Image (cartoon, rainbow, N blue to C red):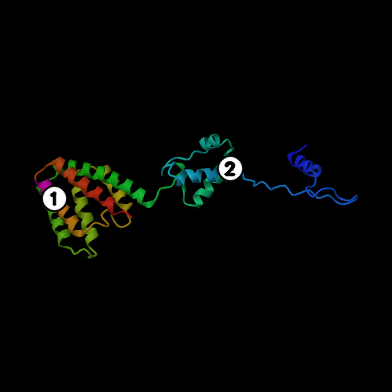
Amino acid sequence: MSEIGDAAGAASSRPDEAGDHPPGAIRRPAPWPRATYVSKSDMVTDALRELIIGRRLSPGTPLRQRDLAEQFDVSYTPVREALRRLESEGLVVSDVHRGATVARTESEELEENYRILAALEALAGSLAVSKMTDGDLAEIEALYRQVAACGPDEDQLAELNRQFHFRLYECARSPMLLLLLRLLWRSFPHGPQAGRSHEESVGQHAQLVAALKSRNEKEVAAIIRHHVLGSIEFLP
């Protein structure tokens, strides 16, 4: 007999709690409490949501369907449905090539980009020291002075700041490094130095120009790294 049939049979043979009934009376058993049905996709969705919100699955963690199906002892279908639901909630992101991963907040993504940018810009600055000419250095210093002369709200400030940085990185004479830096700069909606005061930025640029003039590779790399990583504290 099926589970539903068993339950129905048990219910019909259950004594009425109200006692005996007159002959011919319809005996109505007390209703059984209804069990709440939870689908496999609901179960997987709820479990993954709890793991993500509870930070037990860190941002960027891959969510492989095969591994999840084995972990929850279900087929791929409930897993796919769960991932679709969590993606609609903004907790999961899907990529054609990488598959599903735990979503990152904008701040987390930008912080990672800053750390990569700091490493690459420090490398470019270090390489530039031994390769730049006196003419290169003069152009970099001229751009520094233009940035310093700008007011913090002037429209041309962001572009002049970009020119200052990239004129230095061009001196590394590495097309691939320059390409990677350009791609990273584009990942920042308002530029990588958004949030920092103009005065502080100019002061750090002055330190950088002085280190370039003394041809000190380690100091140049350290100043650039500090300059870029300092922007992380201004993330929302």
Q: Is residue 169 visible?
A: no
Tell me: residue 142, above or below residue 169: below
Give 173 or 42, whichever is nearer the viewer: 42
Q: Position of residue 135 (x, y in %)?
A: 11, 50
Horizontal arrangement in the rendering, residue 186 relative to residue 98 (left or right): left
The residue segment tinted magenta is 207-213
Q: Specify which label sits upstream in the sequence, 2 or 1.
A: 2
Residue depicted at 72% across the width and 47% down the height: 32
Name the residue beneath numbered marker 1.
Answer: 207
Quarter of the figure with the C terminus? bottom left
Quadrant of res 171: top left
Numbered tag placed on residue 78 in the rendering: 2
Query: Does residue 206 appear in the picture of this structure?
Result: yes
* Residue at figure coordinates x 56%, y 46% from the top left: 81
Q: CA distance from mark 2 to mark 1?
A: 58 Å
Residue 60 located left or right of residue 231: right
Q: Nearer the viewer, residue 96 or 38?
A: 38
Q: Amino acid at mark 1?
A: Gln
Look at the numbered disc 1 and give the secondary structure of its residue: helix
- Is residue 14 rendered to the left or right of residue 87? right
The picture places residue 2, in percent across and down from the top left corner, at: 75, 38
